[in-house]
Image (cartoon, rainbow, N blue to C red):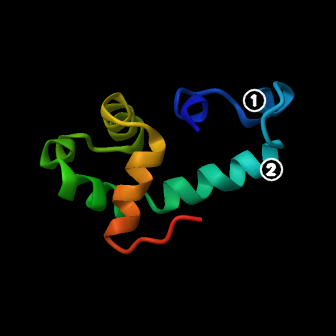
Amino acid sequence: MLALLAGRSCRALSREGMPGRHTLGRWMHRWRERFHLHAFALCQHDPGWGRYPGMATLWPAVLACMPLSAAMILVQHVGIAIP
């Protein structure tokens, strides 16, 4: 997911043994679609993250502080389902 945020294509990643490009695309679409919910939940944990306006800036800031799994646990704790 981090590689997708950094601008790598689903096709390039799928060639490197990642899940298929359709799966990666579906995951990224869902992540973008739910960004406002995730941002709300994460900003409840650290209000300073509210200064990052979009997915491409918020997620790197969050992931500099904690692994993706910990961030998703924070999101889940406020009642947002994480598949």
Residue 2: x and y in percent read 54, 33
Residue positioned 81% across, 34% down in the render: 14
- For image coordinates 40% across by 65% down, the residue present is 76
Count the numbered circles shown: 2
Q: Are marks 1 and 2 in contact (CB under 8 Å)?
A: no
Q: Quadrant of residue 79?
A: bottom left
For the point 53% across and 54% down, which residue is it?
A: 31
Residue appearing at x 39%, y 39% in the figure: 59
User: Eyeballing the image, is 10 above or below 22?
Assistant: above
**Quadrant where the N terminus lies?**
top right
In this rendered view, identify the residue nearer to me: 46 or 36: 46
Residue at which label 1 appears = 13
Q: Residue furthest bottom?
A: 79
How far is mark 1 from mark 2, CA to CA? 11 Å
In the rendered structure, the answer to whether residue 46 lies left or right of residue 24 reads left
Give the SS element for disc 1: helix
Seen in the image, is 34 located left or right of residue 57? right
Pointer 1: residues within 10 angstroms few (<14), some, or many (20+)?
A: some
Q: Which residue is mark 2?
A: 22
Q: Which mark is residue 31?
A: none
SS at badge 2: helix
The amino acid sitting under disc 1 is Leu
Q: Based on the displayed image, in which of its 4 quarters is residue 74 positioned?
A: bottom left
In the image, 69 versus 16, the foreground residue is: 69
* Percent of width and height locating residue 22: 80, 50
Amino acid tagged 2 = His
Q: Residues within 10 Å of mark 2 (few under 14, many from 20)?
A: few
Image position, residue 57 (x, y; %): 34, 35
- For the C terminus, the quadrant is bottom right
Q: Mark 1 or mark 2: which comes first in sequence? A: 1
Left-right relation of 57 to 25: left
